[in-house]
Amino acid sequence: MKKMKFWSSLMLIIVLVSFVTACGDDEDTPVSLNSYIVGNWHSFKFSSTVGQNSVEGAIDKTGAYSQLYYEMSFKNDGKMSVSYWKENTSGISSWVTESNTYMVNGNSVTVSDGDESMDLYFDSNQKLLYARVSTIDSTFGVITVYVYFRK
């Protein structure tokens, strides 16, 4: 009888420990962009709106939307590099890497190559960076594209 009570107690403890650890806080703790930006990032999805139509898709280096695939590497000294597919005048794409600088301001980061700059925005809950580009087309109206990056 003592053995049965011992095994029952042990099983109860195992179940309780499993339950307590499984029911932990699933909420991700927001992080500061200043400390989190350093490292390697890559684009993984996009969403686009053209007038009233929306399109979403996955991005990978060699897939259907590979022209939206970027790899970024942020260093802690304000320097970064970005790699992407660049198409030449003959229509042939090659993988290129460019060196840039960046500056963090709150939940945004400005990437600059000296001549041009682009802002990326940080979602601290999902730990994602995203870029938003909008343009007005005479045929389609407003076109907006979001490209999302993760580590």
Image (tube, rainbow, N blue to C red):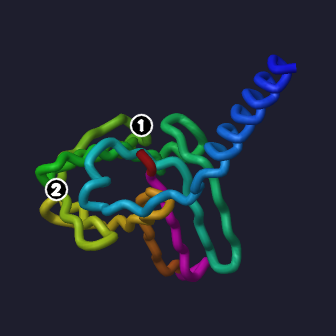
Kind of residue sitting beneath label 2: Thr
Q: Is residue 16 visible?
A: yes
Q: Residue at 69%, 79% (x, y): give it.
A: 52
In this rendering, would 116 be left or right of 84?
left
Give the Cα distance between marks 2 and 1.
28 Å
Q: Residue at 44%, 57% (x, y): give it.
A: 127
- Magenta residue check for 142: yes
Q: Is residue 72 above or below residue 117?
A: above
Q: Residue at 18%, 52% (x, y): give it.
A: 100
State the residue position of label 1: 92
Instruction: In the displayed orientation, state which residue is furthest to the front.
Output: 2
Q: Where is residue 59 in the image (x, y as percent from the top left)?
A: 55, 46
Q: Where is residue 120 in the image (x, y as percent from the top left)?
A: 35, 65
Q: Tell me the crowding category of disc 1: few under 14, some 14 to 19, or many 20 or more residues within 10 angstroms, Cα based.
A: few
Q: Residue at 81%, 28% (x, y): give it.
A: 8
- Magenta residue check for 135: no
- Compare residues 58 and 53 and report the one nearer the observer: 58
Q: Is residue 11 above or below residue 112?
A: above
Q: Can residue 86 be seen in this view?
A: no
Q: Closer to us: mark 2 or mark 1?
A: 2
Q: Position of residue 117 (x, y in %)?
A: 24, 66
- What segment is highlighted magenta in the picture? 138-149
- Compare residues 24 and 47 and report the one nearer the observer: 24
State the residue position of label 2: 101
Q: Where is residue 30 in the image (x, y as percent from the top left)?
A: 42, 63
The reply to whether dot 2 and dot 1 touch (C-beta < 8 Å) is no
